[in-house]
Amino acid sequence: MPVDDSLCGLFGGTFDPIHRGHLAPLREVQARLQVAGLARIIYLPAARPPHRRQPVASAPQRLAMTRIAVADEPQFAVDDIELSRPGDSYTVATLAALRQQNPRRRYALIVGLDALLALETWHRWQNLQRSVHIIAMARPGWRLPKPLPSWWQAARVESGAELRRTVGGKILFMETTPQPISATLVRARLAAGEAEAVLPMLPSGVWDYICAHNLYRNETGDG
Ligand code: ATP
Protein backbone atom coordinates (compact mmCIF):
# COMPACT_ATOMS: atom_id res chain seq x y z
CA MET A 1 0.00 0.00 0.00
CA PRO A 2 1.51 3.41 -0.91
CA VAL A 3 2.10 5.74 2.04
CA ASP A 4 1.22 9.42 2.28
CA ASP A 5 3.89 11.92 1.41
CA SER A 6 2.89 14.10 4.34
CA LEU A 7 4.01 13.45 7.89
CA CYS A 8 1.71 13.64 10.91
CA GLY A 9 3.32 14.74 14.18
CA LEU A 10 2.20 13.11 17.44
CA PHE A 11 2.82 14.97 20.67
CA GLY A 12 1.94 13.02 23.82
CA GLY A 13 1.97 14.35 27.35
CA THR A 14 0.21 14.55 30.65
CA PHE A 15 -0.55 18.24 30.05
CA ASP A 16 -1.20 18.79 33.77
CA PRO A 17 -1.56 21.61 32.81
CA ILE A 18 -0.61 22.35 29.20
CA HIS A 19 1.75 25.37 29.10
CA ARG A 20 3.67 27.54 26.62
CA GLY A 21 6.56 25.07 26.63
CA HIS A 22 4.13 22.64 24.98
CA LEU A 23 3.21 25.17 22.30
CA ALA A 24 6.02 27.51 21.18
CA PRO A 25 8.61 24.77 20.40
CA LEU A 26 5.96 22.80 18.51
CA ARG A 27 5.12 25.82 16.36
CA GLU A 28 8.81 26.08 15.49
CA VAL A 29 9.10 22.39 14.68
CA GLN A 30 6.03 22.49 12.44
CA ALA A 31 7.12 25.67 10.64
CA ARG A 32 10.67 24.39 10.06
CA LEU A 33 9.55 20.94 8.89
CA GLN A 34 6.63 22.04 6.75
CA VAL A 35 8.80 21.62 3.67
CA ALA A 36 9.48 18.05 4.81
CA GLY A 37 5.72 17.41 4.84
CA LEU A 38 4.92 18.05 8.52
CA ALA A 39 1.55 19.70 8.06
CA ARG A 40 -0.15 18.75 11.29
CA ILE A 41 0.62 17.92 14.91
CA ILE A 42 -1.83 15.96 17.04
CA TYR A 43 -1.74 16.43 20.82
CA LEU A 44 -2.39 13.19 22.71
CA PRO A 45 -3.24 13.69 26.39
CA ALA A 46 -2.17 10.56 28.30
CA ALA A 47 -4.64 8.70 30.51
CA ARG A 48 -2.36 6.93 32.94
CA PRO A 49 1.22 7.78 32.12
CA PRO A 50 3.53 4.84 32.87
CA HIS A 51 6.61 5.49 35.06
CA ARG A 52 5.32 8.58 36.82
CA ARG A 53 2.99 10.02 39.43
CA GLN A 54 -0.70 10.29 38.66
CA PRO A 55 -1.89 13.64 37.31
CA VAL A 56 -3.53 16.20 39.63
CA ALA A 57 -6.23 17.37 37.21
CA SER A 58 -8.72 14.79 35.94
CA ALA A 59 -8.48 13.38 32.42
CA PRO A 60 -11.50 15.42 31.19
CA GLN A 61 -9.94 18.59 32.68
CA ARG A 62 -6.56 17.95 31.02
CA LEU A 63 -8.31 17.22 27.73
CA ALA A 64 -10.36 20.42 28.03
CA MET A 65 -7.26 22.54 28.74
CA THR A 66 -5.41 20.99 25.79
CA ARG A 67 -8.33 21.75 23.49
CA ILE A 68 -8.48 25.34 24.72
CA ALA A 69 -4.73 25.79 24.23
CA VAL A 70 -4.71 24.74 20.57
CA ALA A 71 -8.14 26.08 19.59
CA ASP A 72 -6.72 28.95 17.51
CA GLU A 73 -3.92 26.95 15.90
CA PRO A 74 -5.09 25.31 12.67
CA GLN A 75 -1.88 23.24 12.39
CA PHE A 76 -2.59 21.60 15.78
CA ALA A 77 -5.34 19.13 16.74
CA VAL A 78 -6.20 17.05 19.82
CA ASP A 79 -7.06 13.34 19.85
CA ASP A 80 -8.46 11.71 23.01
CA ILE A 81 -7.53 8.20 21.83
CA GLU A 82 -5.41 7.50 24.96
CA LEU A 83 -8.13 8.73 27.29
CA SER A 84 -10.74 6.48 25.73
CA ARG A 85 -8.58 3.35 26.18
CA PRO A 86 -8.39 1.69 29.62
CA GLY A 87 -5.02 1.08 31.29
CA ASP A 88 -1.59 2.62 30.80
CA SER A 89 -0.92 5.03 27.92
CA TYR A 90 1.67 3.09 25.96
CA THR A 91 2.78 4.97 22.85
CA VAL A 92 3.37 1.74 20.94
CA ALA A 93 -0.32 0.81 21.43
CA THR A 94 -1.52 4.30 20.50
CA LEU A 95 0.50 4.20 17.33
CA ALA A 96 -0.90 0.78 16.40
CA ALA A 97 -4.45 2.07 16.93
CA LEU A 98 -3.80 5.19 14.85
CA ARG A 99 -2.28 3.09 12.07
CA GLN A 100 -5.37 0.91 12.02
CA GLN A 101 -7.50 4.03 11.52
CA ASN A 102 -5.17 5.50 8.86
CA PRO A 103 -2.93 2.80 7.36
CA ARG A 104 -1.40 5.14 4.75
CA ARG A 105 -0.34 7.88 7.12
CA ARG A 106 3.30 8.43 8.16
CA TYR A 107 3.97 9.46 11.75
CA ALA A 108 6.65 11.25 13.73
CA LEU A 109 6.66 11.33 17.52
CA ILE A 110 7.62 14.73 18.88
CA VAL A 111 9.26 14.72 22.32
CA GLY A 112 11.33 16.94 24.56
CA LEU A 113 14.97 15.95 25.06
CA ASP A 114 14.19 14.69 28.59
CA ALA A 115 11.58 12.30 27.17
CA LEU A 116 13.91 11.05 24.41
CA LEU A 117 16.64 10.32 26.95
CA ALA A 118 14.15 8.12 28.81
CA LEU A 119 13.16 6.22 25.64
CA GLU A 120 14.78 2.99 26.81
CA THR A 121 12.25 2.82 29.66
CA TRP A 122 9.27 2.94 27.26
CA HIS A 123 7.21 -0.18 26.59
CA ARG A 124 8.65 -2.06 23.59
CA TRP A 125 10.85 0.95 22.84
CA GLN A 126 12.97 -0.69 20.18
CA ASN A 127 9.96 -1.74 18.10
CA LEU A 128 8.57 1.74 18.53
CA GLN A 129 11.80 3.48 17.54
CA ARG A 130 12.23 1.36 14.43
CA SER A 131 8.66 1.91 13.26
CA VAL A 132 8.29 5.67 13.60
CA HIS A 133 10.37 8.81 13.20
CA ILE A 134 11.21 10.80 16.33
CA ILE A 135 11.69 14.55 16.43
CA ALA A 136 13.31 15.70 19.68
CA MET A 137 13.23 19.31 20.88
CA ALA A 138 15.75 21.01 23.13
CA ARG A 139 14.63 21.48 26.72
CA PRO A 140 16.21 23.83 29.28
CA GLY A 141 18.15 21.90 31.89
CA TRP A 142 18.89 19.01 29.54
CA ARG A 143 22.01 18.57 27.42
CA LEU A 144 22.77 16.33 24.51
CA PRO A 145 24.74 13.39 25.91
CA LYS A 146 28.30 12.93 24.63
CA PRO A 147 28.58 10.45 23.11
CA LEU A 148 25.00 9.85 22.02
CA PRO A 149 23.55 6.45 22.99
CA SER A 150 24.27 3.93 20.22
CA TRP A 151 20.58 3.56 19.25
CA TRP A 152 20.35 7.32 18.76
CA GLN A 153 23.64 7.56 16.89
CA ALA A 154 22.49 4.81 14.49
CA ALA A 155 19.14 6.51 13.81
CA ARG A 156 20.34 10.12 13.78
CA VAL A 157 19.57 12.41 10.82
CA GLU A 158 20.39 16.08 10.41
CA SER A 159 17.53 17.36 8.27
CA GLY A 160 13.81 17.01 7.81
CA ALA A 161 14.36 15.96 4.20
CA GLU A 162 15.88 12.71 5.46
CA LEU A 163 12.61 11.85 7.21
CA ARG A 164 10.97 11.58 3.79
CA ARG A 165 13.11 8.67 2.68
CA THR A 166 11.70 6.09 5.09
CA VAL A 167 8.47 5.44 6.95
CA GLY A 168 10.24 5.43 10.32
CA GLY A 169 13.39 4.68 12.28
CA LYS A 170 15.06 8.11 12.14
CA ILE A 171 15.71 10.59 14.95
CA LEU A 172 16.02 14.31 14.29
CA PHE A 173 17.10 16.69 17.07
CA MET A 174 16.05 20.33 16.77
CA GLU A 175 17.45 23.30 18.71
CA THR A 176 14.16 25.04 19.43
CA THR A 177 14.07 28.33 21.36
CA PRO A 178 14.39 27.44 25.06
CA GLN A 179 11.18 27.70 27.10
CA PRO A 180 12.13 27.33 30.77
CA ILE A 181 8.69 26.07 31.81
CA SER A 182 7.43 22.78 33.20
CA ALA A 183 4.02 21.71 34.47
CA THR A 184 5.72 20.92 37.80
CA LEU A 185 6.84 24.54 38.06
CA VAL A 186 3.36 25.83 37.11
CA ARG A 187 1.71 23.65 39.76
CA ALA A 188 4.22 24.66 42.43
CA ARG A 189 3.76 28.37 41.73
CA LEU A 190 -0.03 28.03 41.75
CA ALA A 191 0.04 26.12 45.05
CA ALA A 192 2.20 28.93 46.48
CA GLY A 193 -0.36 31.50 45.29
CA GLU A 194 2.10 33.10 42.84
CA ALA A 195 -0.34 33.89 40.05
CA GLU A 196 1.85 36.65 38.60
CA ALA A 197 4.68 34.21 37.99
CA VAL A 198 2.41 31.70 36.28
CA LEU A 199 0.53 34.02 33.93
CA PRO A 200 3.30 34.28 31.30
CA MET A 201 3.70 30.48 31.29
CA LEU A 202 0.14 29.70 30.21
CA PRO A 203 -2.17 30.49 27.30
CA SER A 204 -4.80 32.87 28.68
CA GLY A 205 -7.68 30.44 28.10
CA VAL A 206 -5.90 27.78 30.14
CA TRP A 207 -5.34 30.28 32.97
CA ASP A 208 -9.09 31.11 32.93
CA TYR A 209 -9.95 27.40 33.02
CA ILE A 210 -7.62 26.76 35.98
CA CYS A 211 -9.19 29.66 37.91
CA ALA A 212 -12.76 28.61 37.05
CA HIS A 213 -12.10 25.05 38.25
CA ASN A 214 -9.94 25.95 41.24
CA LEU A 215 -7.14 23.67 40.03
CA TYR A 216 -3.70 23.19 41.61
CA ARG A 217 -4.49 25.41 44.62
CA ASN A 218 -3.60 22.93 47.32
CA GLU A 219 -2.04 20.01 45.55
CA THR A 220 1.07 19.96 43.41
CA GLY A 221 1.07 16.21 42.87
CA ASP A 222 4.80 16.13 43.57
CA GLY A 223 4.91 15.55 47.29
P1 ATP B 1 5.80 17.69 34.47
O1 ATP B 1 6.59 18.88 34.96
O2 ATP B 1 4.51 17.45 35.19
O3 ATP B 1 6.65 16.44 34.37
P2 ATP B 1 6.05 18.59 31.69
O4 ATP B 1 6.03 20.07 31.73
O5 ATP B 1 7.36 17.91 31.51
O6 ATP B 1 5.29 18.00 32.98
P3 ATP B 1 4.62 16.69 30.07
O7 ATP B 1 3.17 16.71 29.82
O8 ATP B 1 5.16 15.66 30.98
O9 ATP B 1 5.04 18.16 30.58
O10 ATP B 1 5.46 16.66 28.73
C1 ATP B 1 4.99 16.31 27.47
C2 ATP B 1 6.10 16.51 26.48
O11 ATP B 1 6.43 17.90 26.40
C3 ATP B 1 7.41 15.78 26.79
O12 ATP B 1 7.93 15.25 25.58
C4 ATP B 1 8.31 16.90 27.31
O13 ATP B 1 9.67 16.61 27.09
C5 ATP B 1 7.83 18.08 26.48
N1 ATP B 1 8.04 19.38 27.13
C6 ATP B 1 7.46 19.82 28.25
N2 ATP B 1 7.87 21.05 28.55
C7 ATP B 1 8.75 21.43 27.59
C8 ATP B 1 9.56 22.60 27.36
N3 ATP B 1 9.54 23.65 28.19
N4 ATP B 1 10.34 22.61 26.25
C9 ATP B 1 10.38 21.54 25.40
N5 ATP B 1 9.66 20.40 25.58
C10 ATP B 1 8.86 20.34 26.66
Image: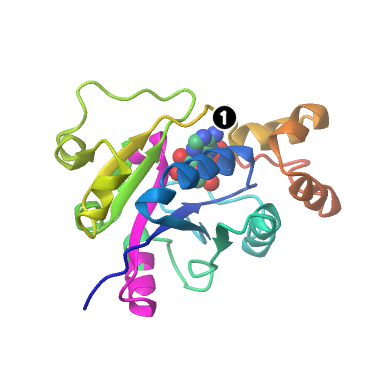
| Quarter location, residue 135 | top left
Point out residue 104 in the picture as x, y percentages from the top left corner. 31, 74
Disc 1 element: loop
Q: On the image, numbered disc 1 is attached to which residue?
A: 179
Q: Could you tell me the amino acid type at mark 1? A: Gln
Side of 10 relative to 199 (left or right):
left
Side of 113 where 172 appears, left or right: left
Q: Position of residue 143 (x, y in %)?
A: 37, 23
The foreground one among 173 and 113 is 173
Task: In this rendered view, identify the residue nearer to me: 105 or 58.
Answer: 105
* Rendered image coloring scheme: rainbow
| Residue 206 visible to the viewer | yes
Q: Give the range drawn in magenta.
A: 94-116
Where residue 36 appears, x then y in whole percent?
A: 35, 50
At 49% from the left and 45% from the top, the residue drawn is 31
Residue ranking furthest to the front: 35
| The image quarter in which residue 200 lies | top right
Please tell me how many numbered marks the rendered image carries. 1
Residue 193 belongs to magenta span? no
Is 110 within the magenta? yes
Residue 150 position (above or below residue 94): above
Sort mark 1 into few (<14), some (14-19) or many (20+) by Cα contacts within 10 Å. some
For the question of whether residue 223 can be seen, the reply is: no
Establish whether ligand 1 lies closer than 8 Å to the Cβ of label 1: yes
